[in-house]
Amino acid sequence: MKRTPSLLQRVMRSMEKIAPLSLSEAAWDNTGLLLEAPFPRPNASKVFLTIDLTQEVLEEAIQDPAVGVIVAYHPALFKPFKRLCLNDDRQSIALKCAATGISIYSPHTALDSCVGGINDWLSRGLGKGRTVPISVNVNPPPGQDGCGVGRLHTLDTPVSLDEVVRRVKSHLNLNHLRLARAADYRTDTKLVSTIAICAGSGFSVLDGVTADVYFTGEMSHHEVLGGVSKGINVILCEHTNTERGYLSQVLQARLLSLLKVDLGLDVEADVHIDVTVSKCDQDPFVIV
């Protein structure tokens, strides 16, 4: 008799279709299955999405008995360790997940680079235009033509810098962001045509890119000064504010759809699957 695939197996298959792990920056990143629960919850039917897997977010997931897999965008386990102890935050999270039967999967940079991923989602909030990768993947996996690191968005109709800021705030549902305005843009006479995009901490991707605006989550003081000195405006939204909206606006529905298709491949599987997004997950910085 054919064994019914587990929830974790279904999630891994579906996430590979969305963000193939071959697109991750494997030289430094830690993506894919990070923790496989040895004794999965017997009635697990729900996937729990979060940007950061903190203790508070984990408690939220544990409280829902249907949660069997956490898809944490940022790797919950990153640095190697030689022991597993509860007095260490990361080790404690791993132990609690294993003990409660919850597995952890992280797509991270694969979800940045893939077609329809976080950087493409960011570009869609900027207005009609042409979007291309900053660094094109020359050997993309099937279905991923046009993938790569970062995005460069060229607007069909140039707009003022203030209008770009308004669009970013609207797309990310932010009341405030940080703006470093280059000298030539201190009035509305010069318009913005090109915007270089990188979710999260973007300087390593954006550095050296010719654009009117750098749009990312965070850069250092001197990195911002360097950009402004070259006539480049810098929009900073805080690291995870450039990532979090993607979960509820794109990934939740897309993953659920693929999981339902996966279920359809196993006609004998009588399992209900759902995908939920953490309500506790939030950027640690608040502008006050």
Image (cartoon, grey):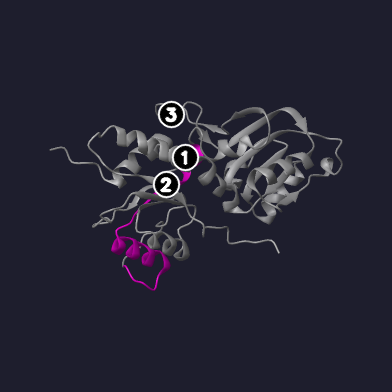
Binning the other alpha carbons within 10 Å of mark 2 as few (below 14), some (14 to 19) or many (20 upward) gives: many
| Residue 215: image location, x then y, percent | 66, 43
| Label 3 vs label 1, nearer the camera | 1
Image side of residue 159 versus residue 34, left or right:
right
Q: In the drawing, what numbered circle is on residue 140?
A: 3
Identity of the amino acid at label 1? Answer: Ala
The residue shown at (59%, 47%) is 242
Q: Earlier in the sequence, mark 3 or mark 1?
A: 3
Judging depth in this view, the residue of 88 and 124 nearest the camera is: 124
Q: Earlier in the sequence, mark 2 or mark 1?
A: 1
Q: CA distance from mark 3 to mark 1?
A: 24 Å
Identity of the amino acid at label 3? Answer: Pro
User: Eyeballing the image, is 154 above or below 237?
Assistant: above
Which segment did they paint magenta?
A: 84-113
| Residue 29: image location, x then y, percent | 43, 48
Q: CA distance from mark 2 to mark 1?
A: 8 Å
Is residue 111 a member of the stretch shown in magenta? yes
Identity of the amino acid at label 2? Answer: Val
Quadrant housing the N terminus: top left
Judging depth in this view, the residue of 118 and 265 nearest the camera is: 265
Task: Read off the residue under disc 2.
Answer: 275
| Residue 138: image location, x then y, percent | 47, 27
Q: Earlier in the sequence, mark 3 or mark 2?
A: 3
Please, what secondary structure does the residue beneath circle 3 have? Answer: loop
Q: Is the C-beta separation of discs 2 and 1 under 8 Å?
A: yes
Q: In the drawing, what numbered circle is on residue 66?
A: none
Binning the other alpha carbons within 10 Å of mark 3 as few (below 14), some (14 to 19) or many (20 upward) gives: some
Task: Read off the residue under disc 1.
Answer: 253
User: Eyeballing the image, is 49 above or below 86?
Assistant: above
